[in-house]
């Protein structure tokens, strides 16, 4: 028996990168998985690969009305939602003085407002399921300070904050809410030069998405039944003093 046998799991940004790894991981543990993303071709292809246990749902996480439709469709197809993984995200860099306000707004809208809207839309369904787990994907950037990522860091620190508020409010419904904080992971989002930069970390190197999937599965599962409002970090030490380890 898988840890998520028969459970409905809703994953945003599930069409590629880490989200796709999470989709495969939950499906392998028996879940019925909704792959929610803007990317139709990739999402449909992944759903076909997995088969009857998965369905693609086109969703822009910044759109409240689309969330209502997506949550209703998920429940109609697979039953009430037990796990929500708010993974969709975008990355923009630039010095504070140079960043375009439109980039700032996009990053906050997708990475932070998208998480808020997702929780609002999924909680009624999770309550009908009798409880569940929400895993909000933050970042090492939600734990420490870094130049050129003001919008991204603000969004990811915000995810950490709203996770704790939600944990306090939703515990009474047996819904746990935690944040996951990856370091450098090999996906289309990772900037060029990251492998070289990571050589400064306590644990050097860029990791495969599966490393983060294992943590997400644990946090969403009953194995983590006493954890809520917590940060789960898998970053090779990046967030320790910006990742610079002592050299021999
Ligand atoms: N790659 C890393 O090193 C790294 C490190 C820390 C945190 N993260 C976070 O992990 C998450 C997954 O990122 P990834 O590295 O797999 O990147 P990715 O770009 O491969 O995947 C992001 C996914 O989100 C989707 N998406 C973007 N905007 C959306 C929207 N408005 N509505 C719905 N879907 C949308 C994209 O289409 C894509 O499928 C993100 O939240 C990211 O910030 C990534």
Image (cartoon, rainbow, N blue to C red):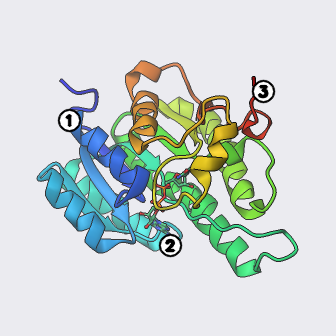
Residue bearing mark 1 = 30
Question: Residue, x 48% and y 40% (percent of image)?
Answer: 207
Q: Secondary structure at mark 3?
A: loop
Instruction: Please tell me whether mark 3 or mark 1 is closer to you in this view.
Output: 3
Please state if 117 lies on the left or on the right of 57 as rendered. Answer: right
Please state if 187 lies on the left or on the right of 4 as rendered. Answer: right
Q: Is residue 138 visible?
A: no
Image quadrant in which you'd find residue 76: bottom left
**Distance (Cα) linking label 2 and label 3:** 45 Å
Q: Between disc 2 and disc 1, whose residue precedes?
A: 1
Residue bearing mark 2 = 63
Q: How would you rate the neighbour count of disc 2 (Cα within 10 Å): few for under 14, some for 14-19, many for 20 or more? A: some
Mark 2 and mark 3 residues within 8 Å of each other at the beta carbon: no
Task: Measuring from the top left, give residue 153's x and y in whole percent.
Answer: 73, 54
Q: Between disc 2 and disc 3, whose residue precedes?
A: 2
Q: Is residue 234 above or below residue 15?
A: above
Q: How would you rate the neighbour count of disc 1 (Cα within 10 Å): few for under 14, some for 14-19, many for 20 or more? A: some
Q: Of 189 and 219, which appears nearest the observer?
A: 189
Question: Residue, x 28% and y 27% (percent of image)?
Answer: 3
Question: Residue, x 57% and y 61% (percent of image)?
Answer: 192
Task: Measuring from the top left, give residue 12's x and y in whole percent.
Answer: 42, 57
Residue bearing mark 3 = 246
Disc 2 residue lies near ligand 1 with CB under 8 A: yes
Mark 2 and mark 1 residues within 8 Å of each other at the beta carbon: no
Question: Residue, x 69% and y 59% (percent of image)?
Answer: 152
Task: Measuring from the top left, give residue 102's x and y in whole percent.
Answer: 70, 80
């Amino acid at each position: 028996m898988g840890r998520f046998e028969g459970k409905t799991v809703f994953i945003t940004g599930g069409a590629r990168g880490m989200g796709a790894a999470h989709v495969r991981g939950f499906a392998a543990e028996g879940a019925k998985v909704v792959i929610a993303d803007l990317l139709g071709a990739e999402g449909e292809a992944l759903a076909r690969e997995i088969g009857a246990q998965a369905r693609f749902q086109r969703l822009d996480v910044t759109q409240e009305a689309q969330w209502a439709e997506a949550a209703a469709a998920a429940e109609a197809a697979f039953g009430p939602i037990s796990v929500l993984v708010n993974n969709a995200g975008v990355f923009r860099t630039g010095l504070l003085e140079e960043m375009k306000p439109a980039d700032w707004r996009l990053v906050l809208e997708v990475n932070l407002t998208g998480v808020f809207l997702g929780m609002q839309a999924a909680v009624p369904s999770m309550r009908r399921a009798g409880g569940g787990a929400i895993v909000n994907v933050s970042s090492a950037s939600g734990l420490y300070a870094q130049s050129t990522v003001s919008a991204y860091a603000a969004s990811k620190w915000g995810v950490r904050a709203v996770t704790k508020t939600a944990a306090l409010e939703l515990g009474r419904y047996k819904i746990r809410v935690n944040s996951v904080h990856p370091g450098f992971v090999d996906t289309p989002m990772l900037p060029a030069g990251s492998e070289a930069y990571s050589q400064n970390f306590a644990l050097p190197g860029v990791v495969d998405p599966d490393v983060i999937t294992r943590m997400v599965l644990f946090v969403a599962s009953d194995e983590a039944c006493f954890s809520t409002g917590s940060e789960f970090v898998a970053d090779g030490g990046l967030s320790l003093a910006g990742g610079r380890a002592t050299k021999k």
